[in-house]
Image: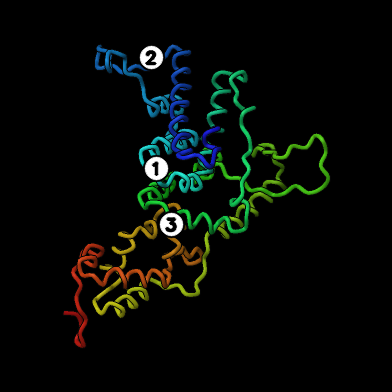
Amino acid sequence: MDLYNRSTSERSLEGFIVHMHLAWLYLLHARLDRDGIDFRHWNGRRLVRVEGEPKTWGLADCLAAEYADQNDPVRRNVEFFIHLRNKIEHRYDKLLAVVVAGKTQAHMLDYEEACVRIFGEAESIGDSLRFPVFLSSLTPDAVKILERTHRKLPKKVTAFIRDYDASLPEEVQGDHRYDFRVLLLPQTGPRTEADAVVRFVREEEMTDEQRQARDVVQTIVRRQAVPVQNMGLHKPKRVAELVEAGLGVRFNVFAHHTRAWHFYEVRPDRHAQRPELTDQRYCLWDEPHCDYLYTDAWVKKLVKDLRDPKRFEEVTTHAPLVLTENGAK
């Protein structure tokens, strides 16, 4: 936790993930050992050994034993970091830390809750948890900053995060134990000595009025976080017409454009649970009409990239057909 909060340190996120992997593993091993559950690997009646030592369960096996529900938010959060651990690229550590901040916060709080639940208050690390000081994430431009950060990350990393989230039920995606998100509202009025700088109010402690106000604010924030506007945007058919005119070769919606947005990963598939998770440089989700619109930048990119016949065939799987006065040839 201390390593993660050292924002100027190299590979702070990587170090956090590796150490938390070990912390979760040791915690769940301790639970199994305390309860007399054999967590060694067996091959029939023979104990599996590695360099003479018994091979014990990995973290994924321990999670399955501790959290039987495959969609338990805590289990899915820890599994996210197991997968992410294999995909981290050292050059992008700081960028990635911004993108997965809510999940890392949940990861830490879930561990604290598990420590107390399994071994009691004496094992709490709550007195070590602090609310960190932020800068950019508290400014009005936070959403734009996050969008720019996404664009700098490797596509395979952002695609993994997007696809992993999309594979989860909505109730898991919105659970604070999976992804901890906070809406900060300055508290007005005079402060008393009993006031804390930061107070977290649990769902079950809220009044109906507080829940209603919370839901209204969340709705506003979500809609502001994903820009949806039609000016300067194009439907797929119009994109195909513009690209075809720009290239002078046949370019239609189904044979070419659909393969292009798949290739460049500018949007999820139509039936994805989170259709708004697009590359907003090129594509936006139009919520009222339940379809996608494409930007001028997307048209320009296609015209620029696909001028090369080899690139055209790589992206669309079709060789370009030059347009003549009588049609394509």
Q: Which residue is mark 1?
A: 90
The answer to whether residue 128 is left or right of residue 46 is right
Q: Earlier in the sequence, mark 2 or mark 1?
A: 2
Q: Residue at x 53, y 42 (%)?
A: 8
Mark-to-mark CA distance, 1 and 3: 17 Å
The crowding category of the residue bearing disc 3, from other C-alpha atoms within 10 Å (few below 14, some 14 to 19, many at least 20), is some
Tell me which amino acid carries mark 3: Arg
Viewer-nearest residue: 309 or 278: 309
Q: Nearer the viewer, mark 1 or mark 3?
A: 1
Mark-to-mark CA distance, 2 and 3: 46 Å
Quadrant that contains the N terminus: top right
Q: Position of residue 140 (x, y in %)?
A: 62, 58
Picture layout, residue 89 above or below residue 32: below
**Residue pushed farthest bottom?**
325
Q: Position of residue 217 (x, y in %)?
A: 65, 54
Give the secondary structure at mark 2: loop
Picture layout, residue 318 above or below residue 38: below
Q: Earlier in the sequence, mark 1 or mark 3?
A: 1
Tell me which amino acid carries mark 2: Asp
Mark-to-mark CA distance, 2 and 1: 37 Å
Picture layout, residue 299 above or below residue 193: below
Q: Nearer the viewer, mark 2 or mark 1?
A: 1
Mark number displayed over residue 169: none
Give the secondary structure at mark 1: helix
Q: Which residue is mark 2?
A: 38
The answer to whether residue 310 is left or right of residue 140 is left
Q: Which residue is mark 3?
A: 151
Q: Residue at x 23, y 70 (%)?
A: 308
Tell me which amino acid carries mark 1: His
